Image: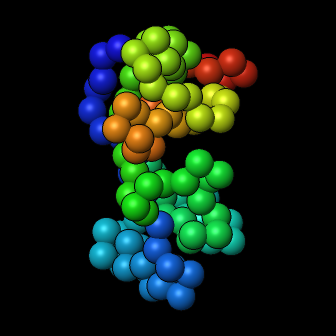
Amino acid sequence: MASQGVTWHAIVVPQDQFDAQEQFVIGTYGVQPAMEMDGVSVFSPDGDVFELYTPATVMPWGLDDGVAFGFRVDDVEEAGKQLEAGGAELLGEIARFPEYQDAWRRFRGLDGEVYGIHGNKPQPGAGA
C-alpha cells in the first residue's frame, strides 16, 4: 500500500464552540463547507478533506483525542486488505462517493489510534 500523502483531517470541538470554529475556517481559510449537517461540516477545497465534528456526531469508533487524519491510496479495498493483514482493525464499511470519484474507510492502527484511507480509484456508478 503506497500512500500519496495525508488527505483527510478531522477534529472534534465542543458543541458550544462548533459554530465559532466553522466560521473561523470559513473566514480565515476562505473555504465554504461542501456538506453540512447538524454538528458536522465537511470542507474539501482541493480534493483533500477537513471535517469538523461535535462529540455527539463522531462515528461510533471515535476520533481518539479529537484529532484524526488519513492517507490517500490508489485502491481503498486493496489498502484495507493490506492494513488488516498487517494487524490493523478495519472500522465500518467502505463509503463510496461516485460523484466525487472517492471512497474512504477508517481503521484502528496498531497504536490504537483511528486513521483513514481515501482512494483515487474511480468508483462504481461514477460518471465519465
Locate the N terminus and report the quarter of the image it occupies.
Answer: top left
43 and 40: which one is in front?
Answer: 40
- Relative vertical location of residue 122 with respect to residue 64 in this rendering, above or below: above
To which quarter of the image does residue 48 belong? top left
Residue 61 horizontal/vertical position (percent) = 59, 48
Residue 37 horizontal/vertical position (percent) = 68, 66
- Coloring applied to the structure: rainbow
Hey, which residue is sitting farthest right in the picture? 125
| Residue 47 seen | no
Which residue occupies 30% across, 16% down?
2
| Residue 124 seen | yes
Hey, which residue is sitting farthest left in the picture? 5
- Relative vertical location of residue 10 with respect to residue 101 in this rendering, above or below: below
Which residue occupies 47% across, 67% down?
12
Disc tally is 0
Residue 77 horizontal/vertical position (percent) = 55, 16
111 and 51: which one is in front?
Answer: 111
- Relative vertical location of residue 118 with respect to residue 63 in this rendering, above or below: above
- Relative vertical location of residue 1 with respect to residue 44 in this rendering, above or below: above
19 and 68: which one is in front?
Answer: 68
Residue 45 horizontal/vertical position (percent) = 41, 52
To which quarter of the image does residue 34 belong? bottom right
Which residue occupies 40% across, 15% down?
86
Locate the C terminus and report the quarter of the image it occupies.
Answer: top right
115 and 23: which one is in front?
Answer: 115
